[in-house]
Amino acid sequence: MLNQELVGLGKKRSTIRELFEYGNARAKAVGRENIFDFSIGNPNVPAPDAVRAALLDLLQNGDPVALHGYTSAQGAEPVRAAIAGSLNRRFGTRYTAGSLYMTVGAAAAVSICFKALCSAPEDEFIVFAPYFPEYKVFIEQGAKARCIAIPAQPADFQIDFDAFARSLSPRTRGVVVNSPSNPSGAVYSAETLTRLAAVLQEKSAEYGHAIYLISDEPYREIVYDGLEAPCPAAFYPATLMCYSYSKSLSLPGERIGYIAVPDVLEAEDLYAAVCGAGRVLGYVNAPSLFQLVAARCAEETADLSVYAENRRILYEGLTGMGYRCVKPDGAFYLFPQTLEADDRAFCERAKQYDLLVVPGADFGAPGHMRISYCVQTEQIVRALPLFQRLAEEYGVKPI
Ligand code: PLP
C-alpha cells in the first residue's frame, strides 16, 4: 500500500511548477518570445566569472578523486571553516567549522531544521504570510509538525506583533523568517528584528525551552538602494541560519547551501540533531565539487544590477497603471494586489494575455499576485502593455 498522502503530494504540482510547465508547452505553440513567464524564481543572470574560474582551476589542478568523492556527512572541514570565517568577518558572528552543515540548497537546510527541532506531532512552527509555500510541505509532511501561518501587515509586510503574540504557545518550537522575502520582497528592519528577538527571548524563558529562529536567507545579498539586510542571527542568538548559493551566485541547479548552527547552551546536541536530521532525510554530503566552489566564492555574487533595473521598470510601470504594490527592498519578486479579490480568477485572466503570474493564495496571502522579475529586461518592457490592457479590462485608471 503506497503512502496516499505522498501520492497526493506528488500528483499535485505546486502552482508555480504548473505555470512553468504550462509556459513551456505554450511556448512551443506560440513561440517563446510571446510568453511572458513570471512564474519561477530561476535567476536569469549567469554565475559570476569567479565561479567559472574556480571550477576550471579545481578541474585542472584538483585531485580528481577527492573532487568527486565523499566528504564528511556535514561537508568538508576546510570548506566549513572558510565559510564560517567569511560569515564572521561579514556579520560579527563566531561560527567555527563545527557550526556549519553543508546542504543541498536552502530547501534541504530548512527541512533539516524543522526535522531536527520537532519531537512530537503537536509541535508548532510559525511562518509569516506571505511565505514560501514549501515551508508548509516541509513542516507538515516532512517533519510531521503543525504549521501556523500569521498574516503580515499588508502596508509593509513587516511582522504583525499582535497576531504573533497570540500565536505563540508552549508548543512553539521554531519561528521562520525569510528576509529578503519570497514573495513580498520585504526586508525586515532592525526595529522588527529587535522586537522579534525580545518576544522570543521572553517566551523562551516563560516556556522553559528555546524557541529557535529559522532564518531562511537565500536572498541575503539581493537588496536595493544601498540597503543591507540586517542579519537575524546578530539580533537573536538562537538562530539557525539557512543559506543557499542558488540566488546570489545564480547556481540553483547545483544544489548547494548550508546551515550555521548557533553556539547556544545545548549547541552540541543541536548540531547533533541537525546531523541526525540530515541523515534521516538522506541529505548527507552536499555536492562535493560545489562545496569547494562555494568556499572559494563565498563573498562573490552574480551581477545583481540587472534585478535593480527590472524592479524599477516593473514597479514604476505597474503602479503608474494603477496597480497597488508595496515597493520591495530585496529579492526579485513584486507582490502587487490583484485587480479583483479572487486572485486565482485574476491570474487566469492574465493567462489570456500570456502573462504568467502566481496567485498570492499560494503564499497564504490571497488578493495578491507574485511577479518574478529575474527575467530578461526586454520581457518586462514588452509585457507592460499587456498588464495595461489587463488593467483596462478591470476599468482601472492610470495614476
Ligand atoms: N527558501 C526560499 C524563500 C526560496 O525562495 C527558495 C527558492 O526559491 C528556497 C528556499 C529553496 O532554495 P534552494 O533552491 O536553494 O533549495
Image (cartoon, grey):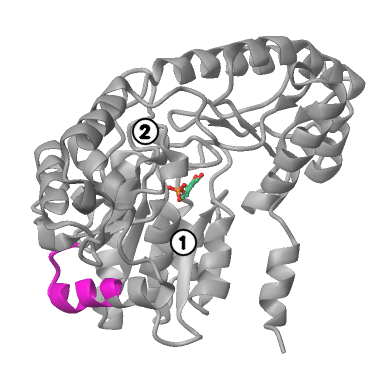
Residue 162's spot in the image, x, y percent? 47, 59
Identity of the amino acid at label 2? Answer: Ser
Q: Nearer the viewer, residue 380 or 258?
A: 258
**Ligand 1 closer than 8 Å to the CB at disc 2?**
no
**Residue 305 in the figure: left or right of residue 333:** left
Identity of the amino acid at label 1? Answer: Phe
Residue 388's spot in the image, x, y percent? 80, 14
In the rendered view, tell whether residue 72 sits above or below residue 186: below
Q: Residues within 10 Å of mark 2 (few under 14, many from 20)?
A: many
In the rendered view, tell whether residue 5 sits above or below residue 61: below
Which residue lies at the image location 26% right of the left edge and 57% below the top edge? 69
**Residue 87 in the figure: left or right of residue 137:** left
Which residue lies at the image location 9% right of the left edge and 38% below the top edge? 89
Q: Nearer the viewer, residue 137 or 194?
A: 137
Which residue lies at the image location 39% right of the left edge and 81% below the top edge? 170
Residue 395 placement: quadrant: top right
- Image quadrant occupied by the C terminus: top right
Q: Which residue is mark 1?
A: 164
Which residue lies at the image location 21% right of the left edge and 36% below the top edge? 58
Q: Is residue 270 magenta?
A: yes
Q: Which residue is mark 2?
A: 248
Where disc 1 sits, the SS reads helix
- Which range of residues does the magenta coloring cover? 262-275
